[in-house]
Image (cartoon, coloured by chain):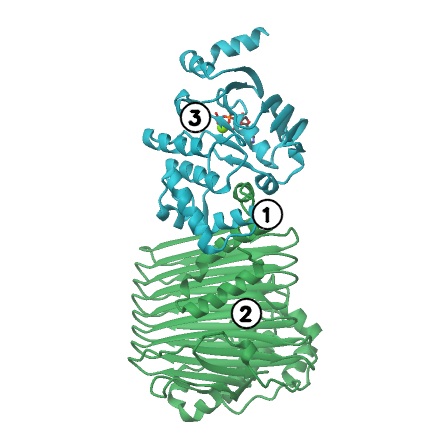
């Protein structure tokens, strides 16, 4: 499917890393896949609009160490007023000194994934590398081969974790480029509840490449709230593979917001492997300047009687590019599935582009599915109505856009997080009302 | 206050206004009637600054200034208000937030201090009474899912909030039940004074029983073809437009 980029640069890339000592089998396998398939180039259907491989070839130099990070305080990355467990990765390394766990140990286990390979080997062995597929995505293969550090989360059964988990990915590219490959493995056991917020922040003017692979298992009757905030400045390149698997009667609420960065690619898959599940799958990308934001999403209904609702919205300004691909699979025995998807976009500038594609593959016959993709401008009649009341054009536009984005935030239940996201949106819109 | 001379406008290739002349003085009420499609709403939109319509000739002087030079928002800030024939639904924008923004932008333009939340709510309560509109309606998204009558009432509420000098009411009576019509008309009347003026576009004499016009004009094919006092409306109610069309054809 993919074509190998110049063999020279691939071997250079591969040669620049030394695989870690954990998970050696899966690393070996991933390197083989990588050697066979290479990184996705121009012809690759899944990366047609997202030339990240070319950028990686041109922008990064290999065989160099990450620049030393100089992060002494994480205050500027926190969400004000959010009482949370804070886990910090700096340039791909888990930082125990900057992290702070406040939940009691019997509520949640939070530790380095490398450590968990020995301390929680049974769990790790049954879930690690089971949802992320190096076969289908070469960046997942790259990540699987060379991950440096990761996070392991375990919530025991019948436990509602009171404090959310705030995961900070800080890349300090002030001195030199940063390349980070990180992982997350989380298991939320039956009838338990967890809320995770992930933030990505890059400092400095040098380029950063971050691949991140996440595997999250949500067991019977468990609930997960997941919020991803991508407000990376500068020359940040990211490929994130997020894979959530749901067991019977579980519920998942997600919200992903992409505001900046150079190229941000989210491969986000929710696998509904149980019956009577509910998934609310929201996203918002508000892009400007030269940012490319690409959301490739999959909702895979494998069992009957579940409900999924996916709503992604985009606002494109400047020379930005938005890509949305929404796959919905309804497997043969997933009868009585209700699966909905919508992707609405507003293009503010003539030089912005958006490529949107729904892809529904339905093998069951007794299902309710719908999808809708729109690309439009702001409604002129509504703009005139607001202006005719004395509201200037810029404010009128901000009001309309603010209203447009609002409903995507419905999957965030934590008011502090919601207000924080709201403030980011307001700032982007220069909201003054 | 308003002097329209030989105003012509079109949309795309379609010429709609063909030389309108109209003078409105402070304190006056003018009614504009005329068959469907004659250009009444177009005239209202052109005055409010809808850019879709291209002015191809003539002039509009408002309080000594060239109205056509102003952006839509500046016209509103200068005191022009259009109550829409079809108010637009804007999901996600609450009426209260919208009005607060509008009021404060207008106040800023006029060199007045902006209102804080408390004084704004005070003003709102007062104006709500005037048109007997319910708070619950204003908490909702702007016009979203409002009934026809509720939308019209909301237009007059906005008018009350913005205290315009020149109000143009485009078929504000359509969609109102008889009680609502009386309430809305009495609201409009309470807002009238010797310094402001009102242009009422309507198809029905009934509204004019409550908002009594000083002049009635008939717009036909983009031109004012007949003007008179309030009795002209009664005549139109009784006889329809055919006789006027005949008169125009003969001339
Ligand atoms: N956006 C538009 N594009 C094309 N034609 C238009 C547009 N807006 C108005 N028109 C045409 O201009 C003419 C005048 O329309 P206008 O809405 O001003 O009439 P009106 O007098 O208000 O009618 P009514 O009594 O039905 O409200 C009509 O023939 C209408 O079809
Ligand atoms: Mg009309």
From the viewer's perspective, tell me whether residue A338 is left or right of residue B165.
Answer: left
Q: Nearer the viewer, residue B104 or A37?
A: B104
Q: What residue do we see at 57% from left, 48% from top?
A: B112
What residue would you read off at disc 3?
B211
What residue would you read off at disc 2?
A230
Q: Earlier in the sequence, mark 1 or mark 2?
A: 2
Mark-to-mark CA distance, 3 and 1: 32 Å
**Labels 3, 1: front one:** 3
| Disc 2 to disc 3: CB gap under 8 Å | no
Q: What residue do we see at 45% from left, 72% from top?
A: A243
Share a chain, discs 1 and 2?
yes
Q: In the current view of this chain or complex, which residue is farthest to the front?
A: B194
Chain A as rendered: colour: green
**Given the image, what chain letter belongs to the residue carrying mark 3?**
B
Disc 1 crowd rating (10 Å Cα; few below 14, some 14-19, many 20+) is many
Chain B as rendered: colour: cyan
The label on residue A143 is none
Share a chain, discs 2 and 3?
no
Q: Within 8 Å of ligand 1, the CB of disc 1?
A: no
Q: In the current view of this chain or complex, which residue is farthest to the bottom?
A: A118
Disc 3 crowd rating (10 Å Cα; few below 14, some 14-19, many 20+) is many
From the viewer's perspective, tell me whether residue A360 is left or right of residue A157.
Answer: right
Q: What residue do we see at 51% from left, 31% from top?
A: B168
In what quadrant of the picture does the N terminus of chain A appear?
Answer: bottom right
Residue A314 to residue A271: above or below: above
């Amino acid at each position: 499917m993919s074509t190998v980029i110049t063999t020279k640069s691939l071997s250079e890339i591969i040669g620049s890393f030394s695989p870690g000592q954990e998970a050696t089998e899966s690393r070996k396998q991933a390197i083989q896949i990588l050697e066979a398939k290479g990184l996705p180039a121009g012809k690759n259907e899944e990366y047609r609009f997202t030339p990240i491989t070319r950028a990686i070839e041109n922008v990064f130099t290999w065989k160099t160490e990450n620049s030393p990070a100089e992060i002494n305080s994480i205050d500027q990355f926190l969400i004000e007023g959010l009482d949370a467990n804070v886990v910090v990765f700096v340039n791909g390394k888990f930082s125990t000194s900057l992290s702070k766990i406040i939940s009691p140990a019997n509520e949640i286990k939070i530790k380095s994934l490398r450590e968990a390979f020995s301390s929680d080997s049974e769990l790790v062995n049954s879930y690690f590398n089971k949802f992320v597929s190096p076969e289908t995505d070469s960046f997942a293969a790259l990540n699987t081969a060379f991950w440096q550090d990761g996070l392991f989360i375990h919530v025991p059964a019948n436990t509602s974790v009171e404090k959310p988990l705030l995961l900070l990915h800080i890349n300090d590219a002030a001195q030199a480029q940063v390349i980070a490959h990180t992982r997350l493995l989380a298991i939320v056991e039956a009838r338990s509840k967890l809320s995770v917020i992930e933030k990505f922040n890059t400092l400095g003017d040098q380029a950063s490449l971050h691949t991140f692979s996440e595997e999250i298992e949500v067991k019977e009757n468990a609930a997960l709230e997941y919020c991803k905030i991508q407000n990376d400045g500068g020359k940040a390149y990211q490929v994130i593979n997020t894979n959530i698997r749901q067991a019977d009667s579980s519920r998942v609420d997600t919200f992903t917001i992409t505001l900046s960065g150079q190229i941000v690619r989210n491969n986000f898959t929710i696998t509904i492997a149980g019956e009577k599940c509910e998934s609310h799958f929201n996203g918002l990308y508000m892009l400007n300047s030269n940012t490319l934001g690409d959301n490739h999403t999959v909702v895979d209904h494998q069992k009957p009687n579940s409900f999924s609702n996916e709503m992604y919205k985009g606002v494109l300004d400047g020379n930005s590019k938005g890509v949305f691909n929404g796959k919905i699979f309804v497997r043969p025995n997933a009868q009585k599935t209700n699966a909905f998807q919508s992707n609405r976009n507003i293009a503010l500038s003539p030089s912005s582009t958006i490529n949107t594609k729904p892809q529904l593959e339905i093998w069951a016959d007794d299902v309710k599915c719908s999808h809708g993709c729109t690309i439009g401008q702001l409604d002129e009649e509504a703009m005139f109505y607001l202006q005719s009341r004395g509201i200037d054009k810029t404010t009128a536009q901000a009001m309309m856009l603010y209203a447009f984005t609002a409903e995507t935030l419905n999957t965030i239940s934590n008011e502090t997080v919601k207000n924080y996201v709201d403030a980011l949106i307001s700032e982007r819109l220069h909201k003054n009302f | 206050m308003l002097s329209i001379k030989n105003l012509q406008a079109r949309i795309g290739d379609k010429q709609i206004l063909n030389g309108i002349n109209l003078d409105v003085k402070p304190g006056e009420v003018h009614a504009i009637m005329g068959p469907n499609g004659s250009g009444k709403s177009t005239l209202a939109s052109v005055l409010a600054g809808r850019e879709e319509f291209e002015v191809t000739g003539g002039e509009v002087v408002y309080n000594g200034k060239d109205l056509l030079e102003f952006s839509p928002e500046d016209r509103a800030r200068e005191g022009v208000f259009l109550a829409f024939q079809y108010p637009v639904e804007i999901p996600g924008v609450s009426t209260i937030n919208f009005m607060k923004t509008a009021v404060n932008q207008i106040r800023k333009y006029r060199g007045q201090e902006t209102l804080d939340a408390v004084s704004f709510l005070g003003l709102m309560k007062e104006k709500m009474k005037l048109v007997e509109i319910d708070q619950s309606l204003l908490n909702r998204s702007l016009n979203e899912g409002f009934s026809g009558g509720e939308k019209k009432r909301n237009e007059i509420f906005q008018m009350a909030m913005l205290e315009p000098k020149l109000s143009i009411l485009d078929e504000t009576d359509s969609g109102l039940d008889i009680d609502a019509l009386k309430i809305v008309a009495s609201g409009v009347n309470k807002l009238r004074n010797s310094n402001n003026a009102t242009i009422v576009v309507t198809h029905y004499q009934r509204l004019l029983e409550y908002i009594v016009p000083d002049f009635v004009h008939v717009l036909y094919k983009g031109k004012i073809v007949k003007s008179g006092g309030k009795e002209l409306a009664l005549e139109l109610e009784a006889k329809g437009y055919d006789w006027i069309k005949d008169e125009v054809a003969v001339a």
